[in-house]
Amino acid sequence: MALTRNEPSPLAGVRVVDLSTTFMGPYCAMILAQWGADVIKVEAPAGDVLRYVGDAKVPGMGPIFLNANRGKRSVALDLKDRAATDVFARLVESADVLVHNLRPRAAANLGLTPERILALNERLVYCAFCGFGSGGPYENRPAYDDVIQGASGMASVQGVNGGRPAYWGSAAADKTMGIFGAAAVLAALHGRAVTGRGRAIEVPMFESMASFMLLEQQGGWIFDPPSGPTGYPRTESPYRKPFRTKDGFLAVMVYTDEQWRSFFTAIGEPALADDPRYRTIGTRTVHIDELYSLMDDHLTRRSTAEWQEIFERADIASSKVNAIQDLFDDEHLVATGFFESVEHPSAGRLRMARPPVDMGDRATATLRHPPRLGEHSVEVARELGYADAAIADLVGRGALVDAATPSQDAAAVPGQDAAAPGQDAARAEEGHAPLQ
């Protein structure tokens, strides 16, 4: 999209309080930051556990944290201290959106129920991520990406033709949930613009990912009683995988009637276009194993570049198979300026992906660097009306953690795996002062 307008980002003026940790909540809030929201990340004195995962140049600034928390400000509060809960209450009163991923019991122990929060600010959009939806027997179970991949059918589908279930090689459920959450928040903000009132949103991982999987995998079970098996034959085919070429691998998707005719001509078998098994998308889906097996055989006979040229002429979607490190030199990503160099005040120079969605303000949109723990504690406290003497008292008693204090990196927990909802439940049940 060539059009670039010099105007505010769409969420300019929206304040988001991000009380979440690890992947999905922070990813949701980071998307909102990319679209212009002022996101204040509220962390415990130990910080989000993802600060300490991965190869960090400085303590507390691991690579996943850097990616998931760009564009935010960090306020570190010890919510065991009543004075810190007062700061948090003021922050909620000033906000448009609150995001958290506490289990319901933990949220209740902290006084973070929708009823109490919306009583503080009736215009707030309260977005709670959870592992399992409220009202069911799994309601207070802990949940992580791997568990949800298993529960939702994702892992089972990876076990093609009855093979062993497998996880996606990515925290796919967590990141999908972040997108679900961002969409829900935007819908709720639109509703508030109409009614003047906020609302409570529950974004459950299990139900959301079950819905995600059923879209194309429900098959004959869309009918009651079922008319046939679950599943989608094209994605179940053992031949659905990157195809080996003479010199590498190629991802190819031949889809329309015209594309299949072009492919059959390219392999020297144009008559196959009139074969009853392959004439329509319905019959091709039934016989997809045979088609993919045919492709698997023929693609080995030419180089990746030769096939890409053929497929480009035929308007068939294809791409060489990139390793993650290949993305940094991909000619398209380079040409579109996808990566940008960012100077971080403590972590040094970073190479980061710019916001992928072009809102028409790419030339003017800027994001804050990923924050150090408590980097903006004092700044935000002043915005909330605290005098410098009161702030000094909060910092002195440890209720508010300032990045300038030497203890801010002391709570590093290297080697912990990244978690999902409910990781703060234990802390919530160990004497945190409830929000008043």
Image: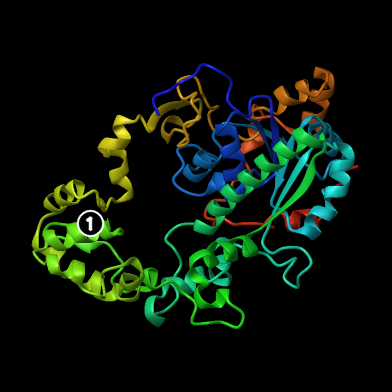
Tell me the quarter of the picture where residue 244 sits: bottom left
Q: Can the viewer see residue 375 in this picture? A: yes
Quadrant for the N terminus, please.
top left
Q: Is residue 399 visible?
A: no
Structural crowding at the residue carrying mark 1, measured as other residues with C-alpha within 10 Å and reported as few (<14), some (14–19) or many (≥20)? many
Coordinates of residue 326 in the picture (x, y in percent): 28, 45
Q: Is residue 313 above or below residue 405?
A: below
- Decide which of 346, 69 is in the foreground and name it: 69
Viewer-proximal residue, 314 or 9?
Answer: 314
In percent of width and height, residue 372 lies at 59, 33
Q: Amino acid at mark 1?
A: Leu
- Residue drawn at 78 percent across, 56 percent down: 106
Q: Quadrant of residue 11?
A: top right
Give coordinates of residue 228: x percent, y percent. Answer: 49, 82
Q: Position of residue 113 (x, y in %)?
A: 83, 50
Q: Which residue is mark 1?
A: 250
Q: Which of the 4 image quadrants contains residue 289?
A: bottom left
